Image (cartoon, helix red, strand yellow):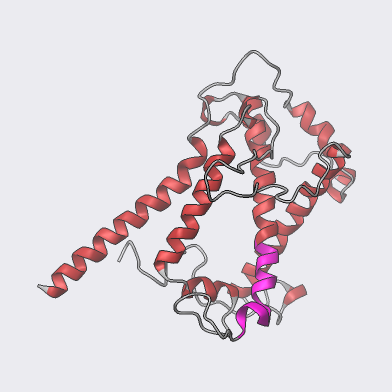
Amino acid sequence: HGASAKRSLVRKLKMKVLALVLSLSAHGLAYVNKAPRKDFALAATKKDMMALAEANPDYLGQSLGLWDPLGCLNLDFWTLGNEATIGYLRHAEIKHGRVAMAAFLGYLAQSTPVVSGPHAKLPYSGYEPGLTPPEQWDAIPLAGKIQIFGIIGMLESYGEILPQHYCNGGLPGYYPPIKGNRFELIFNLYDPFNWFDDNKDKVRGRQVEINNGRLAMLGIFSIISESKVPGSVPLITGLIPEYKGDYMVPFEADFSIFS
């Protein structure tokens, strides 16, 4: 009876975690209107994207200009319309760039002895010194991982509650103030200490962020590739420890839904 009850508990836990992950993966569409509003100009046509790309001072902008090999700027996602789709794609690139910058810097930080070395007080149950960044994730208890995903889902949801959505003509990449929305939110996610002047050289600042995000995406995927296939990225061969786990299975160390 004890073994049967344990198996039943594990099955229930699997279903709850699966439901949580699926809900977080779909949250980004929850606030997208079915069709764009018509009382303002979206100003996100393919010609606008060509001008924006050519104005970018990076290598791609100065040499290739607009680079859209898959023709995504001609598509219509979820019947939102082409201009709304372009707004979505612009926002997605900026957001993925920000995540990649956090991931790249996070990998570097977690590789230092300050994070991966011995601690007088363990940062979490199951912590072991000397683990690589992906192994550190595997060592986090399941409850901790669920909390991390829950926080990400909360922040993503707040990022979709906009005065003017990026699919409806809003500014791609804009993240609204969240300070005070809940008692534990004592800082804004963007510029929590009010260090930046939003009125100073906005265009250049956004171009720099896009360029840094693109570089970070290449950087973090180079690290992931080298850790899975040693020697696949010659520039960093021998610098990145091999990882035996699976990056695409975040709960691999806890359970498997399909086994």
Across and down, in percent, residue 234 comes to 74, 74
Q: Quadrant of the C terminus?
A: bottom left
Is residue 120 or residue 75 the one in the foreground? 120
Q: Is residue 65 above or below residue 12?
A: above
Q: Is residue 60 above or below residue 163?
A: below
Please tell me how many numbered marks the rendered image carries.
0
Relative to 27, is 167 on the left or the right? right
Q: Main secondary structure of the magenta part?
A: helix
Q: Is residue 96 above or below residue 101?
A: above
> In percent of the image, x 56 and y 25: which residue is there?
80
**Quarter-of-image position of residue 158:** top right
- Residue 116 belongs to magenta span: yes
> In percent of the image, x 64 and y 54: which residue is there?
99
Across and down, in percent, residue 202 comes to 84, 38
Across and down, in percent, residue 173 comes to 69, 40
- Residue 17 belongs to magenta span: no
> In percent of the image, x 82 and y 35: which residue is there?
52
Span colored in magenta: 103-117
Name the residue at the front extreme: 183
**Quarter-of-image position of residue 56:** top right
Name the residue at the left extreme: 1
> In percent of the image, x 63 and y 68: which residue is there?
225
Is residue 200 or residue 22 the one in the foreground? 200
Q: Quadrant of the N terminus?
A: bottom left
Across and down, in percent, residue 61 comes to 85, 43
Name the residue at the top extreme: 39
